[in-house]
Amino acid sequence: MQTISTDVLVIGGGATGTGCALDLAMRGIRCVLVEKGDLTHGTTGRYHGLLHSGGRYVTKDPQSATECAQENAILRRIMPHCIEQTSGFFVITPWDDESYGDVFVANCRRTGVPVQEISVAEMLRREPALNPRISRVFEVPDASADSFLATHSVALAAKEYGADIRTYHHVVELVRVGDRVTGAIVEDLRNRERIRIDCAYVLNAAGAWAGKIAAMAGVTVTVVPGKGTMVAMNHRMVNTVVNRCKLPSDGDIIVPIHTVAVIGTTDVHVPDPDVFGIEPEEIQFMLDEGEKLIPGFRQYRALRAWAGVRPLYKDKEVASDRDIPRTFKLLDHEARDGVSGIFSIVGGKWTTYRLMAEQTVNEIARRLGNTQPCRTASEVLPVPRFEHRAHATVTVSPDPAAQTPHYWLGKPLALIESAHAAGELICECELVTRDRIIAAIDAGAHNLDDIRRDVRMGMGPCQGGWCIYRTANLLYERRCAAGLSHSHVNEAILHFLQERWKGLTPVLWGDQLRQARLDELIYLGVLGIQHLRAFAEPGGGLVTQHPAIATEYVQA
């Protein structure tokens, strides 16, 4: 078994884990990060894409509100290519308590969340699709964020500073000698080889899975997996984040992100972060709530539904998951449990990942005798090679806002039309070119799902109907010389279709049902995908339920 040594082993490749790896590396502390899937495979890649202003938490969780307000400004500076400057409205509808508006404003000012009231006429001028019966509107600095791109940018910066980032490495066990954790045994899921990693400290940044990692060290961390279900609609009916101005509840926010609008979320306790489903009533409830914000909301096409699991840290009894604070907690297991060599960082949210990392690394650095200060709030993050949206010039668009490096919706099309992003279109829905997909593969994407997260391939209305087979061909072309087999690519196709089908099943009606039928004809009638199962690698554990193989829905 290979053995490597480092100062800190970070477990978890989401926003918090990669943020910690970057902060450690910038201070000159050796670190290895391991993640059982791709970066953002867990909660980071399964949320609605909101950069919080803090407005949602000003009443029930003021500490989180203040943290979000402060980090909001920092993230806009250090990752402008990942942020769309949408702004945000908190609106009082006829179903909401009119008196809460004054409470909301007072609490915003108390917690440091910038807020101003605007007229309903101004709201309708900017967002004419919103309900004209809305009575009051408060503007806050919400924005939408690309968490996939942001995490890759953080990981890229960490690697540039010397961090060792290892995806598809699963923690098999933590090594404990007496009352001290000294490292871990991890398995490379690509070749089944095991590696021993010796370290001074293990940092458990596994999010909703932090309790499982902690249990390997013989300590208890109570992480409550809170399922949040979201629905992506095929049209951006608003270009501003819209919240109901009331205490947080289900289906009370619409986030415009990239080419879609996302409505969410629910908050349902699940016993296991790996085992949960999406119930039909969740979808119908959110669509009904969408009607209160945007009349005719149900007439838009629902593309897919998905759910993420919030890593809520519970240190006391509360009435419901929504009452658990969204603040974060650094657990020193030596002081708490008598087991040294391990820390757990739990709770929090995407908007506060950098602050979580800073406070965590401050403590680890102190233990290691490292006095270097944190610099992550001031250094702008690099742009991955596969991402072209940050490279537009003022000649690409007449929009003055396009002169900034911030993401704006029309940039991909403008870049293609101006030949700044040459190459044939592979994903026509999301305007993803061959060159970008090849860049993602060359940058380390191992399968089709990795490519999807990197460049949004397969995330449009057809949900991969036209681009999966094209991208699979490119994956094989670029990797066959390195030993990638056709069986691996076949398995990747089956897995991708399975995951897309999971999100399609809850919204199979109208145009999306017709689209699913077309996908079935492509993959079953033309490509014969049902035969790929015989060629997939044995032991892959795939039980494909895509309509290309299971067609009973057609008769329904």
Image (cartoon, helix red, strand yellow):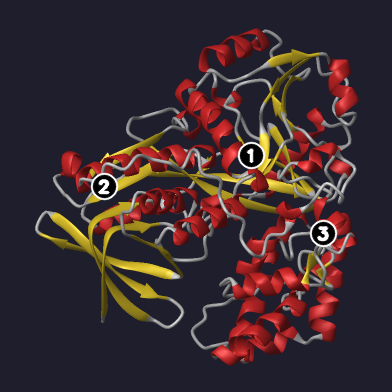
Give whichever of 396, 472 is nearer the camera.
Answer: 396
Q: Name the residue under label 3.
A: 461
Task: Give the amino acid type for the residue marked by disc 3 in the picture.
Answer: Pro
Residue 391 at x, y = what percent?
Answer: 73, 54
Measuring 74% from the left and 21% from the top, which residue is drawn there? 91
Mark 1 or 3, which is nearer the eye? 1
Q: In this view, does 255 lie to the left or right of 23?
A: right
Residue 165 at x, y = what percent?
Answer: 43, 64
Where is residue 516, by image quadrant?
bottom right
Q: Is residue 422 above or below residue 381?
A: below
Residue 116 at x, y = what percent?
Answer: 70, 15
Q: Is mark 3 on a helix, strand or loop?
A: loop
Q: Name the residue under label 1.
A: 50
Q: Residue furthest left?
A: 178
How far, Cα to Cα, is label 1 from label 2? 31 Å
Residue 172 at x, y = what percent?
Answer: 31, 69
Q: Mark 2 points at which residue?
A: 220
Measuring 57% from the left and 88% from the top, which residue is drawn there? 484
Q: Which mark is residue 520?
A: none
Q: Which of marks 1 and 3 is nearer the N terminus?
A: 1
Give whichever of 460, 150 is nearer the camera.
Answer: 150
How far, Cα to Cα, is label 2 from label 3? 43 Å
Residue 555 makes an appearance in the image: no
Where does the C terminus fall, quadrant-wise?
A: bottom right
Task: Give the amino acid type for the residue marked by disc 1 in the picture.
Answer: Leu
Give whichever of 554, 408 is nearer the camera.
Answer: 408
Q: Is residue 231 above or below residue 323?
A: below
